[in-house]
């Protein structure tokens, strides 16, 4: 579904077609997209980016659509496989020595819309798999992965904002619950899809549980 179809459906559910509502719909849409971005961390949001590291530089800007890290690796130039880095809080990152093991990156942190990797070095690539924030819908014909796969999340999110705007308490509770259920369904589907196949096994000290 595109933006026009989604807003038309939301208006039909709420039976609201007045000019005041139509004028407020873009603002409602931004609120809904913000809530979805805060709530979802699923595979469909995953996107890959690479940053070429430079000596004497520990800080690199994050992509503008950054929604959170899923995996961070260091790749050596000319190699396909790398080493996964572990997140540290900024204050813990500051305790690391910049001299010992200059060629080994084991940690990263996020601060002020930048990713920090220490120690700095050349001939390595930082490969990040991150959760992309929803591409914003602005034109009637706009779509994104969520409108194509789960338009109900947008529709019931808009219905929640419309009924809140109309001070319709009963309608608000109904659509708030349906909105939450749609987001939960997306998360559950992602878990089933991501972990399909044999049952997960946990290995502890050589034992498989």
Image (spheres, grey):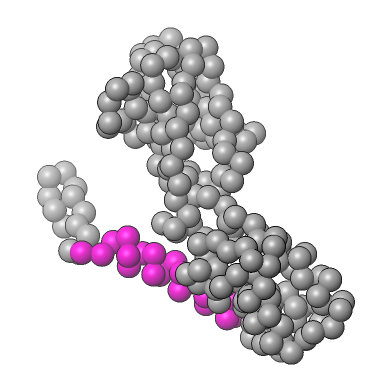
Residue lying furthest front: 141
**Position in image of residue 180 (x %, y %):** 56, 74
Q: Which quadrant of the structure image shows residue 113?
A: top right
Residue lying furthest top: 99
Residue 150 can be seen, yes or no: yes
Residue located 57% across and 38% down the image: 63
Left/right of residue 59 with respect to residue 188 in the rendered view: right
Left/right of residue 60 with respect to residue 191 in the rendered view: right
Instruction: Characterize the magenta stretch by its predominant secondary structure.
Output: helix
Q: Is residue 191 above or below residue 87?
A: below
Magenta-tinted stretch: 176-197
Q: Is residue 32 above or below residue 60?
A: below
Q: Is residue 207 above or below residue 188?
A: above
Residue lying furthest right: 20
**Position in image of residue 170 (x %, y %):** 71, 89
Q: Quadrant of the N terminus?
A: bottom right
Q: Is residue 120 above or below residue 62?
A: above
Q: Nearer the viewer, residue 181 or 127?
A: 127
Residue located 76% across and 65% down the image: 26
């Amino acid at each position: 579904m595109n933006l026009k179809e989604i807003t038309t459906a939301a208006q039909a559910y709420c039976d609201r077609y007045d000019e005041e509502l139509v004028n407020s719909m873009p603002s409602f849409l931004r609120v809904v997209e913000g809530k979805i971005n805060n709530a979802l961390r699923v595979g469909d949001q995953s996107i890959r980016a690479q940053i070429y590291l430079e000596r004497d530089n520990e800080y690199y800007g994050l992509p503008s659509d950054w929604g959170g890290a899923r995996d961070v690796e260091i790749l050596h130039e000319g190699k396909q496989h790398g080493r996964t880095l572990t997140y540290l809080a900024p204050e813990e990152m500051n305790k690391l020595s910049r001299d010992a093991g200059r060629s080994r990156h084991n940690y990263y942190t996020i601060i002020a819309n930048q990713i920090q990797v220490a120690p700095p070095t050349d001939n390595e690539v930082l490969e990040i798999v991150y959760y992309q924030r929803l591409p914003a819908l602005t034109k009637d014909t706009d779509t994104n992965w969520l409108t194509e796969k789960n338009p109900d999340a947008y529709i019931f999110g808009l219905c929640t904002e419309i009924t809140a705007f109309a001070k319709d308490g009963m309608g608000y509770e109904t659509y708030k619950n349906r909105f939450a259920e749609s987001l939960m369904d997306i998360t559950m589907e992602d878990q089933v899809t991501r972990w399909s196949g044999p049952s997960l096994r946990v290995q502890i000290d050589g034992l498989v549980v």
